[in-house]
Image (cartoon, helix red, strand yellow):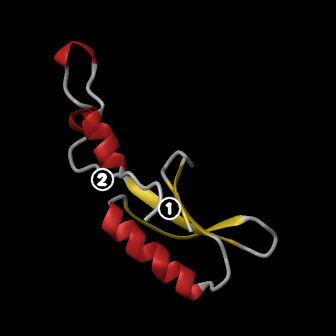
Amino acid sequence: MGLWKTIGQVMLSEMAEGGERTQREKLPHGFSPRAHIQYQDAAGMWQTFTTTAADASNVSQVMRTVALAHPGKRIRCVDEHGELIDLL
């Protein structure tokens, strides 16, 4: 599954100074981290295929689906800030 860590896991593991709430608790109610699944086209540009909830099992399944739809292409998952989460 690569170097995958869900955004939620990272937020839960990062405790603020002085025992304050976690980053996850500071998020607006109902906020769900998103992940963009992209493939690399023939020109070398990354094209977004879909956006999904950023949980490991979901992202892994969607990446495999995109790989089947675009055989031979590189597939990656990036967060909302463009940071690499996983690469096939």
Do residues under tags 2 and 1 come within 8 Å of each other at their CB atoms?
Answer: no
Q: Is residue 39 above or below residue 56?
A: below
Q: Is residue 37 above or below residue 24?
A: below
Q: Is residue 9 left or right of residue 42?
A: left
Sort mark 2 into few (<14), some (14-19) or many (20+) by Cα contacts within 10 Å.
some
User: Could you say which is closer to the camera, residue 1 or residue 27?
Assistant: 1
Percent from the top left, x then y, of residue 74?
Answer: 65, 71
Sort mark 1 into few (<14), some (14-19) or many (20+) by Cα contacts within 10 Å.
many
> Label 2 sits on what residue type?
Ser
Percent from the top left, x then y, of residue 30?
Answer: 22, 50
Q: Secondary structure at mark 2?
A: loop
- Tell me the quarter of the image containing the C terminus: bottom right
Q: Secondary structure at mark 1?
A: strand
User: Could you say which is closer to the camera, residue 20 or residue 73?
Assistant: 73
Percent from the top left, x then y, of residue 81?
Answer: 53, 45
Percent from the top left, x then y, of residue 45?
Answer: 74, 64
Q: Which residue is mark 2?
A: 32
Residue 55 in which image quadrant: bottom left
Q: Is residue 2 left or right of residue 55?
A: right
Q: Residue at x 28, y 49 (%)?
A: 31
Q: Residue at x 30, y 47 (%)?
A: 8
Furthest toward the front, the residue is 2
Q: Which residue is mark 1?
A: 36
Furthest toward the right, the residue is 43
Residue 56 in which image quadrant: bottom left
